[in-house]
Image: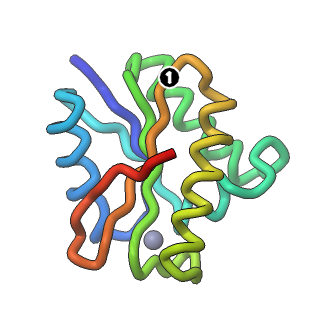
Amino acid sequence: MSFYTVINCMDGRTQIPAIEYLKKKFNVDHVDSVTEAGPVKILADQPHHSRRCQAIFDRVDISVEKHGSIGIAIVAHHDCAGGLLDDDSQKQQLKDSIKNVSAKYPNTPVIGLWIDSDWAVSQIAE
Ligand SMILES: [Zn+2]
């Protein structure tokens, strides 16, 4: 069994698009989901000192260590109620989040996914 990890928003509209994208793109059997309201807002800010950030990492650890996840995707999306920022600002937070999560998991590839107003998923350039 193969696994991928997604750090997704809690928004119900983003779950299936992210899971389907990752299963198809990386040919994995399952996607472990860690959800927060606007996770990029948490991960872009002071990642090593934030209790909320550590709570995310605690769950990602399980996916990486117990399931041998082959990669970690971080999601940001249009109309996010958790972030309260415009799309461009959220995309910048997504890039900052990739840097911080990559530093925490240097042996696991980390990517960023943007989900647009049509709920289409695209990988953002780092
Ligand atoms: Zn959201």
Residue at the spot 80% in from the left edge and 52% down from the top edge? 46
The kind of secondary structure element at disc 1 is: loop
The verdict on label 1 being within 8 Å of ligand 1 is: no
Residue 64 vs 115, above or below: the answer is above
Where residue 40 sits, quadrant-wise, is bottom right
Q: Which residue is mark 1?
A: 108
Quadrant placement of the N terminus: top left
Ligand 1 position by quadrant: bottom left
Q: Residues within 10 Å of mark 1 (few under 14, many from 20)?
A: some
Q: How many marks?
A: 1
Outermost residue, right side: 49
Side (left or right) of 84 relative to 63: right
Residue at the spot 50% in from the left edge and 18% down from the top edge? 65
Where residue 71 sits, quadrant-wise, is top left
Residue 7 can be seen, yes or no: no
Residue 32 vs 2, above or below: the answer is below
Amino acid, disc 1? Thr
Residue 12: horizontal and vertical position, in percent? 31, 69
Q: Nearer the viewer, residue 12 or 78?
A: 78
Residue 31 can be seen, yes or no: yes
Residue 94: horizontal and vertical position, in percent? 55, 57
